[in-house]
Image: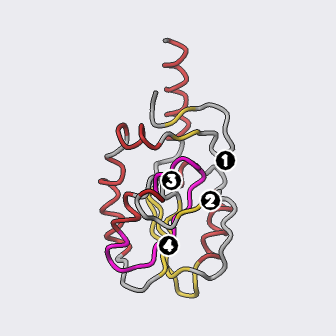
Amino acid sequence: MSAFDTATTTSSAGQQWNAQDYAIDAGFVPTLGGAVARLLDARAGERILDLGCGDGVLTTELALSGAHMQGVDASPEMVIAARARGVDAQVMDGHALAFDGAFDAVFSNAALHWMPDPDRVLEGVRRALRHGGRFVAEFGGHGNVATIVAAVQAARVAH
């Protein structure tokens, strides 16, 4: 088993995530995301949305600044894992963010490339931000998820 499976799921990216396997197979992702988190420069009292919070590792680190963190992720299992860390997280598709002027900042690490309609995601981010808010994100390059999915499918066929 791997951190993600291309099995049928309600996730817009067509992935079903496994939080335990993610921590094992992709534990490096939050570590690498630390540099992006520093760019965010979270401050005490701010309200920050972690878009694609996953298992909440970076969300909890950002909360140490004193910021009020809210996590959203399309994977129910990842949201359960984030909540187990104490993150205020909910299942929500990044294409359909249900916030209006609620956040000083939106943060996203290693998630946006799983969301195939960036215009819808960015519209939701814009709507979620208060006037003058900031958006700090990191995501893979063009086509990287398609390459990963194709490689996983090829490996499955080979085995």
Q: Is 24 covered by the magenta stretch?
A: no
Q: Who is closer to the viewer here, 59 or 122?
A: 59
Residue that mark 2 sits on: 94
Residue that mark 1 sits on: 12
Q: Is mark 1 on a helix, strand or loop?
A: loop
Q: Who is closer to the viewer here, 85 or 40?
A: 85
Q: What element carries label 2?
A: loop
Instruction: Point out the tag, 4 or 3, that comes first from the N-terminus.
Output: 3
Amino acid type, residue under disc 3 in the picture: Ala
The numbered dot on residue 111 is 3
Q: Is 70 covered by the magenta stretch?
A: yes
Q: Residues within 10 Å of mark 3 (few under 14, many from 20)?
A: some
Residue that mark 4 sits on: 135
Left or right of 108 on screen, residue 91: right
Q: Are marks 2 and 1 in contact (CB under 8 Å)?
A: yes
Task: Using the numbered discs, state the Cα–Cα distance from disc 2 to disc 1 in whole angstroms.
Answer: 9 Å
